[in-house]
Structures are given as structure tokens and as C-alpha cells.
């Protein structure tokens, strides 16, 4: 019986990963995984690892498109593939946050606006600028570097969002992200940390990205998480699922900015 315990533990961790994959993407999961509501409380540890899956999908789309079309087209298709895989889950959260924080003066009003499924002017402008910047940054990177940047940005940006689950309180009594927003232990965050940093270390070790780009990207993502966390606490007293999406999106862009800056291609 004792010999079976490690196998059962490994199988449970595998189930938690698939639960996270099902929650954060629209990708199908095997039927044998099953589902229990309590698993959602512990699945956020694999949020960065889900980012690795999304990175692989986006990178494959970029690599295939780059065989036929120029870099801007490949960058746009890679971004579209990532959005399709996640169902625009994080982009929608960013747009909702722009609407809520742009149009709400009180905590209650901000939460009310963010809950509204309709997109307003702040959200439309914000998501338009964000997607344009994201595609532009990827298009300006050499193809091999762009693909490597995807494998850095998607896991690390999701680790930045996971840090809010680890350190902050959930701001709503109910919400779509509430099951994932239960108390996260340091051990669970460590699992997420490993899931994000291991790909980054491999990218540096095999010279796909410079260590300066990797460190700058990590610091940029951490800076985004810290800045937005302070804003969320001040305005809402915590975070919501939309806040997590906003952190992920802005941290991803911060990483692309860092990678491009490391190449020394400034306008002047």
C-alpha cells in the first residue's frame, strides 16, 4: 500500500494540472481526470505551467506562419492562437479592469462595472493598445528570439498573477475566480515558481535568450505585479479574477519590452 502512495500523489498532481488547464484555457482534458470542486482550490499552483502550454501553441503558430509570411503576420497569428487557446480569458479581464478603474469612483462602482460583460470606452482603448503593442513587440524581434520570448513571457506573467492569489485577499463575496482564490500556501506558490523559472533557466542556459533579457523580464513582471497589487488593495481591498488577467497581460508585455530592449534597437 505504501508503494502506491507516491503514484496516487503524482496522479493527483496531474489531475490538478488538468483542472487548471481546463479553467484557464478552452483546451479539452482527458475524461479520466474527473472533477471535484475542492481541486479548484489547489489548482492555481499550475497556472504558470498552463502558460507553458499556451506558449507552445503560440510558438508553433509563429514558427509555421514564419515559413510563409513576414514576421508581422507571424506575430499576429501567434497572438491570435494564444487568444483562441485561452478564450481571451486574460484579455477580457484586462479590458474589464480598464473599464472599472477608469469609470468607477467608489469600490462598489468599480466592482459593478468590472462585472458587466459589456465593454466600454476605457476597455476598448486599453485592449486595442495592449494587443497592438504586443504584436508590434513580437514582430520586431528576430524569429528565434520571438519564439523564445513566448516561452519566457507566458509562464512568468502567470506567476506574477499567481503572486496575487498567494499574498492578497479576494475582493468579492462571489465570482468566477473565487474557487481558485482560496488561501494559497507558500509550498503551492513554490510549485508555481518552479513551473515558471525552470523554462526561463533553460532559455538562458541554451542561449536562446540573454541572461540580461531574462532578468529584466522577471523584474518587469514583478514590478507590474507589485504596482497593480498596490492599486488593487487601495481601490478594492484585494483582487478579482479580472485583476489577475490584467496582471498577466501587462506582465507579458513588460517581458517582451525587456527582451527587445536587450537587443539594443532603440530608435535613437
Image (spheres, grey):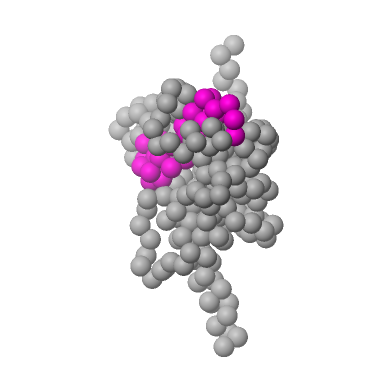
Q: Is residue 68 visible in this depiction of the protein? A: yes
- The image quarter in which residue 107 lies: top right
Residue at horizontal 46 percent and vertical 45 percent from the top: 55
Residue 257, given in percent of the width and then of the height, sits at 57, 28
User: Which quadrant holds the N terminus?
Assistant: bottom right
Most extreme residue toward the top is 268
Foreground pick, 18 / 137? 18
Residue 222, given in percent of the width and then of the height, sits at 66, 38
Q: Taking 186 as reference, is 207 above or below it? A: above
Answer left or right for 190 relative to 36. Answer: right
Q: Main secondary structure of the magenta part?
A: helix
Most extreme residue toward the bottom is 1
Foreground pick, 181 / 33? 181
Residue 26, given in percent of the width and then of the height, sits at 37, 50
User: Which quadrant holds the C terminus?
Assistant: top right
Answer left or right for 203 relative to 74. Answer: right
Q: Is residue 256 visible in this depiction of the protein? A: no
Q: Taking 16 as reference, is 145 above or below it? A: above
Q: Is residue 92 covered in magenta?
A: yes
Residue 121, given in percent of the width and then of the height, sits at 43, 22
Q: Is residue 80 covered in magenta?
A: yes
Q: From which residue to which does the magenta span run?
A: 78-107
Residue at horizontal 43 percent and vertical 36 percent from the top: 116
Q: How many marks?
A: 0
Most extreme residue toward the left is 68
Residue at horizontal 66 percent and vertical 46 percent from the top: 168
Residue at horizontal 54 percent and vertical 33 percent from the top: 110
Amino acid at each position: 500500500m505504501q508503494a502506491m502512495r507516491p503514484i496516487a500523489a503524482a496522479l493527483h498532481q496531474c489531475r490538478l494540472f488538468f483542472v487548471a488547464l481546463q479553467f484557464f484555457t478552452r483546451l479539452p482534458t482527458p475524461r479520466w481526470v474527473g472533477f471535484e470542486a475542492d481541486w479548484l482550490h489547489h489548482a492555481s499552483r499550475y497556472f504558470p505551467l498552463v502558460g507553458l502550454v499556451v506558449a507552445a501553441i503560440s510558438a508553433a503558430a509563429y514558427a509555421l506562419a514564419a515559413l510563409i509570411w513576414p514576421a508581422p503576420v507571424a506575430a499576429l497569428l501567434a497572438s491570435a492562437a494564444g487568444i483562441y487557446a485561452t478564450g481571451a480569458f486574460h484579455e477580457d479581464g484586462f479590458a474589464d479592469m480598464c473599464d472599472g478603474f477608469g469609470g468607477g469612483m467608489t469600490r462598489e462602482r468599480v466592482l459593478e462595472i468590472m462585472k458587466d460583460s459589456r465593454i466600454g470606452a476605457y476597455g476598448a482603448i486599453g485592449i486595442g493598445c495592449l494587443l497592438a503593442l504586443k504584436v508590434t513587440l513580437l514582430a520586431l524581434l528576430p524569429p528565434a528570439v520571438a519564439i523564445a520570448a513566448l516561452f519566457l513571457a507566458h509562464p512568468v506573467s502567470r506567476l506574477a498573477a499567481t503572486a496575487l492569489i498567494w499574498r492578497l485577499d479576494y475582493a468579492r463575496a462571489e465570482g468566477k475566480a473565487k474557487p481558485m482564490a482560496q488561501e494559497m500556501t507558500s509550498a503551492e506558490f513554490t510549485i508555481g515558481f518552479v513551473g515558471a523559472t525552470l523554462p526561463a533557466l533553460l532559455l538562458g542556459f541554451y542561449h536562446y535568450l540573454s541572461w540580461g533579457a531574462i532578468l529584466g523580464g522577471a523584474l518587469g513582471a514583478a514590478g507590474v505585479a507589485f504596482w497593480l497589487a498596490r492599486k488593487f488593495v487601495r481601490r478594492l481591498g484585494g483582487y478579482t479574477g479580472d485583476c489577475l488577467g490584467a496582471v498577466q497581460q501587462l506582465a507579458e508585455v513588460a517581458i517582451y519590452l525587456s527582451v527587445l530592449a536587450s537587443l539594443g534597437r532603440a530608435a535613437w
